[in-house]
Image (cartoon, helix red, strand yellow):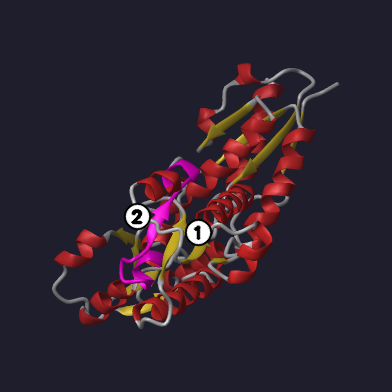
Amino acid sequence: MKLTVDIDPNSGFCAGVTRAIKKAEEQLEGPEGKLFSLGSIVHNDAELSRLEAKGLVTIDKEDLDEMQDAEGETLLIRAHGEPPSTYKKADALHFRIIDCTCPVVLKLQESIREAYSGIKNGNVDGQIIIFGKPGHAEVLGLVGQAEGHALVVENWRMLQDAIEEGKVDLKKHIEIFSQTTKNPAEYSSLCSRLEEMMAKENELPMQRFAGRGLLTVHNTICSQVATRHAKLSKFAIEHDILIFVSGKASSNGKVLCDRCKSLNIRTYHIETPDEIRKEWFREDDKVGVCGAASTPKWLLEDIANSILAFNAQ
C-alpha cells in the first residue's frame, strides 16, 4: 500500500474567525489600506503574516493606553470580544470601530450581564462562575461583563480549591457559564460534580435540589466547537497518524490536539510545513491532517502537499 493523506473537512476557521478575517480584508483592500487589530485576529502566525503584508497592524492593551488620539484610524475588535472598558477607551481615542465579536460570544456576554445585573441589584443572592482559561481574551471580555465580579476556573481542581478557600458559597445561587471553545465533556462533568456538592451542602436529595433552582447551568459552548470534538475524535481513530496544525498560543488548538493525542498516540502538533519530519511516517500510513478553529484551510493544504512531497522523494 502507498501512503495517503486526508484533510479533515471539519477543520479550519470557525464562522466567527472567517467573518473577522473577511471584514479585515475588506478594510485592507479599501482606500485606507490599513487596519489596527486589538490582539491577534487569529492565533496562527502564518495567517497573521499574510494579513500583516496587506497592512494589518496588531496592537495590545498597553499600546492602546499609550495612544493620545486615533482620529481617522480604524480598530478591529476580534472574534474573542472585549470588555466594556475597551470600547470606552477606543471611543475616547476617536477610533472607528469594526466590531467582529463572534455572535455566539456576544450572546454569552449578554447572558452574563443579565445574570450579574440580578446579583448587583439584590434580586439574586449568588455569584457567577466562568469555566474557562484564566487570562484568555474571550474570558477577559466575559469577566468584564460582570465588572470583574466573576470567578474563573479552568478545571475541577481549581473549582474545588475555590470552594475550600471560601470563594464559593454552595448554599447561595450559582450561575455557571463556559468559554465558548471549551471541551463540552469537561464542562458537563464539572457542572455535575458541582451540583452534587451543592445538593449535599444543602442537605437535599438530587431530585429535590434540582427543583430549588440554586444552580443555573448555561449551555454556552459554541455548537460548531461541540460537534467538532465528536467529528475530530472519529477522524483521529480512522487514521494511523495525525498531523495537527495550529498556533501554539491557540486555546482551542490545545484542547483539540490533546483530544487527538488521547485517541491516537501518533499525533504531532505543528505550526508550519518546515516542522514536518520524514521519520514520523511509514510507507503504508493513512495520514490525517487536521487543525483548530484558527487554522486556515490553505495551510492545511500546504501541510498535506508537503507530506506527499516528502514521501515521493
Circles 1 and 2: CB atoms closer than 8 Å: no
Q: Is residue 32 above or below residue 166?
A: below
Find residue 16 and report its horizontal and vertical position in percent. Answer: 55, 66
Q: Which quarter of the figure is the C terminus placed in?
A: top right
Pick whichever, 279 or 105, lies toward us.
Answer: 105
Which of disc 2 and disc 1 is earlier in sequence? Answer: 2
Q: Where residue 167 is drawn, which disc sits there? A: 2
Callout 1 amino acid: Gln
Residue 35 visible, this angle? no
Image disc number at residue 299? none
Quadrant containing the N terminus is top right
Q: Please tell me how crowded label 1 is: few (under 14), some (14-19), or many (20+) other residues with Cα within 10 Å.
A: many
Q: Residue at x 64, y 48 (%)?
A: 185
Which quarter of the figure has residue 216?
A: bottom right
* In-image side of 215 versus 88 (left or right): right
SS at circle 2: loop
Q: Amino acid at mark 2?
A: Lys
Q: Residue placed at 50% from the left, 63% from the top?
A: 176
- Asked if residue 31 is positioned above or below residue 302 in the image, the reply reads below
Q: Is 189 above or below relative to 277?
A: below
- Mark linked to residue 179: 1
Q: Which residues are magenta?
A: 142-158
Residue situated in front as seen by the camera: 253 or 299: 253
Q: Residue furthest right?
A: 1
Residue 152 colored magenta? yes
Crowding at mark 2 (Cα within 10 Å: few <14, some 14-19, many 20+): few
Res 235 quadrant in image: top right
Q: Nearer the viewer, residue 57 or 253?
A: 253
